[in-house]
Amino acid sequence: MKNAHRTVLSTVAALLLATPFVAAHHGSAISYDTTHLWSTWATVTSFSYQNPHPTMMFDRTTKDGTVEHWVSELLTNPSVLARAGWTRGKSVDALKAGTRVKLYVGTSRAGGHSGIVMKIENEQGENIVGDRSDVKAVDLDGVPNGLQPTGEKKLPGQPGA
Amino acid sequence: MTKIATTVALALVPMAMLVQSAIAQGPPNRGNPQAASVSSDTDTRAYNKRDFNGLWARNPQAYGLPRCPECADPGPWPPASYGFLGTPPPRTPEGQKLFDMNKPGRGFELGSEEANRRTDLDVGMRRAVLPAFGNDPEARCEPLGLARLITFSGGGATMEMIHSQANDRILQRFEWTWDNREIWLDGRKIPNVDDYLPRYNGYSTARWEGDTLVVTSTGFDDRQWLDQYGYPISGKAVLEERWERPSPNRLRVQLTLTDPAIYTAPWKSSLKVWTLIPKDKMAIGGWSGILEDRCVPSDEQKFNEFRDHAAGKK
């Protein structure tokens, strides 16, 4: 598995820029590996529509039946969401606890079950609570721990997942 | 396993192309600050060049309007750089000391390949740390300060200009942190900063030079950062702003910071350009105007817990 990961990431590293300029609101992007996004189905456990970025907790079930508990922030901030039609009421309603969603995630550079959510789709395949419909990611639904950071994306001194 | 790896890698190719394509497109004025002085507005209707009233943004496409290429900050990075920019002058020993104390979370990451390679950029753009380990006042919901309000406004966060009915001042309102400042046009003199309490947004007086509004601000609270890259500003700084409306739908400003305690020469910013957004375009539920986009400490604290977790901060 480690070799497979290494193969994937070295291939991708050759294709993507290694480190984008960090300019997101509150500098969030620098804390996550946003150059290696992955997607997964998940169930919302809580959602908070707040500044500077909404936060969400979700569970995902791996192929062996293990339930992982994740924490995340959304890249899109409330003012942008509101102007895109995703007001507080509509967003909270769309992400009620128990809602099944497909998430496009960048894992935290410390590793583990923390990430930034770049895009959310509902079960009908519609982009919800966001305006980043062009985000692409590798599908790792059911894969334990999703995609964990490696190489220079991995923060030194952090334990593995 | 090899098959999985190959599949995953192939699946990521379109993503890589997308990223590279976005980077390749970039703002048309990238690396060419002079291009920013040309307005892309094609509206030829007559207008009052001294009327700055209105809602202004730097991302008109978010409101269903044509893009504004010159509204993006110049530079070799994505358009949302929102800094003072220009060419920072050398810092004084005291200025360097203050600069070193500030740990921003924006820019190229300290020690990264890009940060080491882009020596054409000032070190302020190449020293970002994870926000969890930085000390940006914004992460504590402290006031941003005038220059940072101006340079940050217009992307996700918008700005409003209001001329008073008596025409003795212009009120400038900023969406992110729901802040404001007054620009006085009643002929009052620039205050002696030692006679006043420092203010995050300083004290601003203005005069017209032709159709250019020249604003001079002093009396800054030195706890603020000049911009999100952690450049310091002292309580003795003087900020000059030259505002112009070069076409019906464009507003722009050139900032010059004179702060001899921190910088050895005046510092001219890049040109900042906004697009006029019609009221009906900037409305939610029929209610137009800027949002009350406050930085609420309790929200920030909760967010920072997630931020710290992502950084593995104990």
Image (spheres, coloured by chain):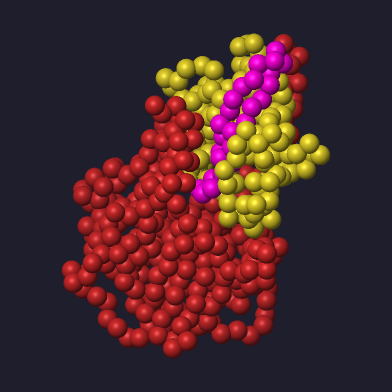
Residue A77: horizontal and vertical position, in percent?
A: 57, 49
User: For the magenta stretch, what is the residue range?
Assistant: A50-74
In magenta stretch: residue B135: no
User: Please, is residue A20 above or below residue B152 in the view?
Assistant: above
Magenta stretch, main secondary structure class: strand
Q: Residue at x 54, y 48 (%)?
A: A50
Residue A109: horizontal and vertical position, in percent?
A: 51, 28
User: In this view of the protein, which residue sits in the foreground, B176 or B298?
Assistant: B298
- Tell me which chain appears yellow: A
Q: Residue at x 22, y 70 (%)?
A: B196
- Tell me which chain appears red: B
User: In this view of the protein, which residue sits in the foreground, A54 or A139?
Assistant: A54
Seen as rendered, the residue at the extreme front is: A97
Choose top left, top right, bottom left or bottom right for residue B283: bottom right
Quarter the C terminus of chain B occupies? top left
Residue B207: horizontal and vertical position, in percent?
A: 38, 82
User: In this view of the protein, which residue sits in the foreground, A61 or A46?
Assistant: A46
Seen as rendered, the residue at the extreme bottom is: B166
Q: Residue at x 67, y 80 (%)?
A: B44
Residue A27: horizontal and vertical position, in percent?
A: 48, 43
